[in-house]
């Protein structure tokens, strides 16, 4: 008998079902790839059906069992329905990764209230709603893992991120609240704080904020931008038995950016 069958690796996610919001590109797809390669079946969520189809293709080529759910996480009904859809189509839900996010960069005095709400609804309220929707299924399964994606803006300020920074600071406190509330249900809730990662989001930022590319390079001790692949490992760690006694934390994955004085 294969000893690994009796004694699975703490990083083995075989038999688990994971839902990754914003899983059709960037960091979300990096995390979905990691979870899928560790054995989980994956539901990726995004609004753009073409991006959903391309990401699904990529996951299937890796041999991952995957489905795509088109949904707008900023819409409460759609956000709750996406969780139910994943449960119905994949037979349960053990892992929820709240990764979908947007940024609108402006001086604080220039935001409309609609822009403020759009960022907060997408980045923060969606994580609360999805977690609330996932809770009964995770309780039924006697455990679960929730990973919320924060940012360096969970820790630091910047002049052009008032709603984004508020949403990402909120993600850390939401993580702690859910972690303490649901620890007794064997549900671990943690946040990941990515540093500067090369994705569509930051390609736009580099166009909009002059000198950003070089400032990030100069300030990151690792001397490079991160890639979505840099997030694969932390996703597997926080979604598997390896992290069963870790909850309520916020872990930077930033090449040392937040350690630099
Ligand atoms: P991308 O712009 O590459 O990806 C964003 C993802 O979120 C896409 O899959 C997009 O899919 C999805 N999304 C956005 N809005 C919605 C919505 N309303 N409903 C459903 N899906 C939505 O960005 P990143 O990969 O860079 O960012 C992912 C997360 O990581 C975000 O929360 C971001 O704040 C965070 N982050 C990123 C950093 C970086 O350096 N890149 C640094 C720190 C944090 P679609 O457009 O199809 O809806």
Image (cartoon, rainbow, N blue to C red):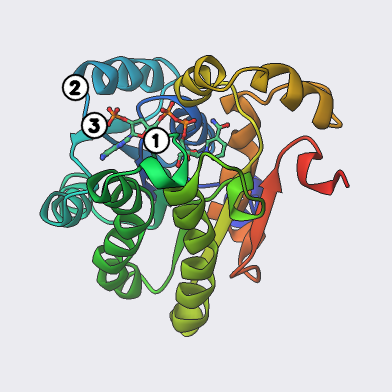
Whether the residues at callouts 1 and 3 have beta carbons within 8 Å, the answer is no
> In the rendered view, does 214 fall on the left or right side of 18?
right
* Residue 147 visible within the image: no
Identify the element where label 3 is drawn. Answer: strand
Where is residue 24, by image quadrant?
top left
Q: Residue at x 83, y 22 (%)?
A: 223
Rendered view: 196 above or below 251 = above
Q: Residues within 10 Å of mark 3 (few under 14, many from 20)?
A: many
Q: Residue at x 22, y 24 (%)?
A: 48
Q: Which residue is mark 2?
A: 49
From the top left corner, tell me how far across and down residue 58 is, in percent: 39, 16
From the top left corner, tell me how far across and down residue 231 is, in percent: 60, 36
Q: Nearer the viewer, mark 1 or mark 3?
A: 1
Nearest to N terminus: mark 1 or mark 3: 3
Q: Which residue is mark 3?
A: 68
Q: Which residue is mark 1?
A: 104
Whether the residues at callouts 3 and 2 have beta carbons within 8 Å, the answer is yes
Rendered view: 69 above or below 9 = above
Whether the residues at callouts 2 and 1 have beta carbons within 8 Å, the answer is no
Quarter holding ligand 1: top left
Identify the element where label 1 is drawn. Answer: loop
């Amino acid at each position: 008998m294969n000893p690994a069958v009796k004694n699975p690796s703490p990083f083995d996610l075989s038999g688990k079902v994971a839902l990754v919001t914003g899983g059709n590109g960037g960091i979300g797809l990096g995390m979905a790839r990691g979870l899928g390669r560790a054995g989980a079946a994956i539901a990726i969520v995004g609004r753009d059906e073409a991006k959903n189809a391309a990401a699904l293709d990529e996951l299937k080529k890796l041999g991952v069992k995957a489905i795509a759910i088109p949904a707008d996480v900023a819409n409460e009904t759609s956000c709750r329905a996406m969780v139910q859809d994943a449960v119905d189509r994949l037979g349960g839900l053990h892992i929820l990764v709240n990764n979908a996010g947007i940024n609108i960069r402006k001086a604080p005095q220039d935001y409309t209230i609609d822009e403020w709400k759009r960022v907060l609804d997408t980045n923060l309220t969606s994580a609360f709603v999805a977690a609330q929707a996932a809770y009964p299924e995770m309780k039924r399964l006697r455990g679960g893992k929730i990973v919320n994606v924060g940012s360096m803006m969970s820790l630091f300020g910047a002049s052009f991120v008032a709603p984004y920074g508020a949403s990402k600071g909120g993600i850390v406190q939401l993580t702690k609240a859910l972690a303490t509330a649901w620890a007794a249900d064997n549900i671990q809730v943690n946040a990941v704080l990515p540093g500067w990662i090369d994705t569509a989001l930051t390609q736009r930022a580099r166009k909009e904020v002059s000198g950003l590319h070089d400032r990030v390079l100069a300030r990151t001790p690792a001397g490079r931008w991160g890639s979505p692949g840099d997030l694969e490992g932390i996703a597997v760690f926080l979604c598997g038995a390896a992290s069963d006694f870790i909850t309520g934390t916020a872990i930077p994955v930033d090449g040392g950016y937040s350690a630099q004085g």
